[in-house]
Image (cartoon, rainbow, N blue to C red):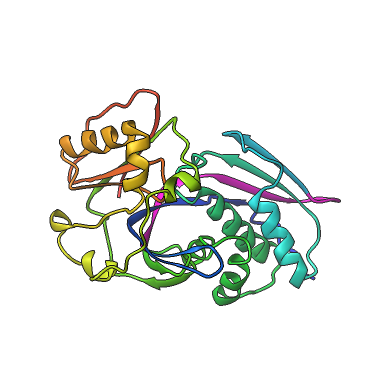
Amino acid sequence: MTINFKQVLFFPNAKINIGLNITSKRGDGYHNLESIFYPIGWKDALEIMPSESLTFQSSGIPIPGDGNLCLKAYEVLKRHYPIEPVAIHLHKNIPIGAGLGGGSSDAAFTLMGLNTIFNLNLDKSTLKELAVQVGADCPFFIDNVPSLARGIGEVLKPVDLDLTNYHLMVVKPKVFVSTAEAFSAIVPQENKTPLDMEAQQDINRWALKNDFEKSVFPLYPELQDIKNKLLEAGALYASMSGSGSSIYGVFSEKPMLEFKNSTVFYQPL
């Protein structure tokens, strides 16, 4: 196997959910959804180096638990291809439990990084098949383009959605929302109009909603307060991302806002 360790540093990025509908409950206990995944510039840093044994270290935001999706991605790939051990270092910058897909992105970029380093020459279709074995959101980050997601998030279709003329502010308060809490008041229902068609309208007319807000906002009123503050400051659209707890706003001009006890990310899209 030819090994290429010229590129060892990668920058996994986050995503936001533009609209999120829970459409039905599956026989396996999961739920089908419909959402637009949109990539944003909030990034982690991922370093993969040669090593005599497989190791993982992290810095930045502490990662809870013993396992990690980067290691899971390595193990999934190794089941199919004879790759050698590596040392993985992840500098965690994207908040955890924020609805921003940071862990899924780290795993997807690990797969892509290992594909590059070991010259496996796997195409994107194959990488997506591997990525879904790690997590439902992981395949999105292989193409990393605005996409309509269905199923449990793994059925993807690129959408023509460009927010590059706008400004994005993402606010992550010190709130953790459990999956059980998020689903507590969900009544699955098919959306009459597909999200990708709704998103083609002018942003000022968007009626896109996140179903999880119904259950999460009553439990954590500060999240509703953040959304209200974004809208009052002129956001053309504001929403919770995923099942929380990040709230974002899309503005026509740079917003002049401060949020105490929260992590705030801003970028001109």
Image point 41% across, 40% down: which residue? 245
Left or right: residue 3 compared with residue 242:
right
Q: How many marks?
A: 0
Residue 127 appears in which quarter of the rendering? bottom right
Stretch in magenta: 34-54
Out of 239 and 180, give the one closest to the viewer. 180
State whether residue 202 is above or below residue 248. Answer: below
Image location (x, y in percent) of residue 57:
71, 40
State whether residue 82 is above or below residue 138. Answer: below
**Residue placed furthest toward the right:** 52
Image location (x, y in percent) of residue 259:
32, 27
Quadrant where the image shows the N terminus: bottom right
Image location (x, y in percent) of residue 143:
47, 67
Image point 51% across, 63% down: which residue? 30
State whether residue 176 is above or below residue 129. Answer: above
Out of 46 and 222, give the one closest to the viewer. 222
Residue 109 appears in which quarter of the rendering? bottom right
Residue 184 seen in the figure: yes
Image location (x, y in percent) of residue 236:
17, 47
Most common SS among magenta residues: strand
Left or right: residue 60 compared with residue 202:
right
Left or right: residue 108 compared with residue 1:
left
Residue 41 forms part of the magenta stretch: yes
Residue 2 seen in the figure: no
Residue 255 forms part of the magenta stretch: no
Out of 251 and 262, give the one closest to the viewer. 262
